[in-house]
Amino acid sequence: MSKEQQINSGMAHNMLSAGTKIVGTITTNSDIRIDCEIEGDIVSKGKVVVGTLGVIKGTVDCLNAEVMGNITGQIKVKELLSVKATAKITGDIITKILAIEPKALFNGTCKMGETADAQQPAVKK
């Protein structure tokens, strides 16, 4: 891999803007920001950011996540899940570390720490 490819691969980000609706599964090796409506699953080896306009109906599976919008479904985060004051989550959370701001809405179950690690499927190489 050339030096330019190495630099560019480290800066790869995906962004789905407001006014977009996606039905299906999104899989990415990099970070992704969602400010649109998605009916389906999101699988990311990086960070998933759900903006205030983001609406997800499905499963989110990622390394880290920051939620400011709405998620209905299961959220599986291998490291840190940060739930901001504008967020509304209905469903189950499995994460190693959870940070929830005051006024955020969460209705569901939560598994954290070592219990959460056991729930994560093994990563295929």
Image (cartoon, rainbow, N blue to C red):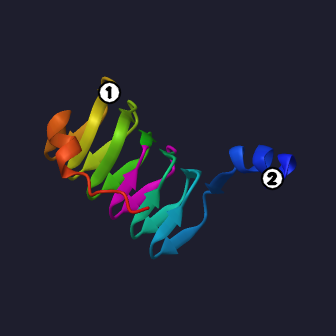
Q: How many numbered marks, from 0 up? A: 2
Label 2: element kind = helix
Placement of the N terminus among the 4 image quadrants: bottom right
Extreme residue in the bottom direction: 24
Span of residues in magenta = 51-63
Q: Amino acid at mark 2?
A: Gln
Rendered image quadrant of residue 95: top left
Q: Which element carries disc 1, helix, strand or loop?
A: strand
**111 to the left or right of 8:** left
From the top left corner, tell me how far across and down residue 121 is, in percent.
Answer: 26, 57
Q: Amino acid at mark 1?
A: Ala
Q: Residues within 10 Å of mark 2 (few under 14, many from 20)?
A: few
Kindly tell me whether residue 107 is visible in this rendering: no
Q: Is residue 60 magenta?
A: yes
Residue furthest out toward the top = 102
Task: Reply above or below: 87 against 61.
Answer: above
Within the magenta stretch, is there residue 93?
A: no
Residue found 86% across the figure and 48% down from its top:
4
- Which numbered tag is attached to residue 21? none
Q: Position of residue 65 (x, y in %)?
A: 43, 41
Q: Where residue 29 sits in the image (x, y, percent)?
A: 56, 57
Identify the image quadrant of the C terminus: bottom left
Separation of disc 2 and disc 1 at Cα? 35 Å
Look at 45% across and 72% down and name the residue there.
25
> Would you say residue 25 is visible in this rendering?
yes
Residue 58 appears left or right of 45:
left
> Where is mark 2, residue-wise?
5
Mark 1, Cα crowd under 10 Å, few <14 / some 14-19 / many 20+, is few
Residue that appears at 52% across and 45% down: 51
**Tag 1 residue:** 99
> Going from the N terminus, do you reach mark 2 or mark 1 first?
2
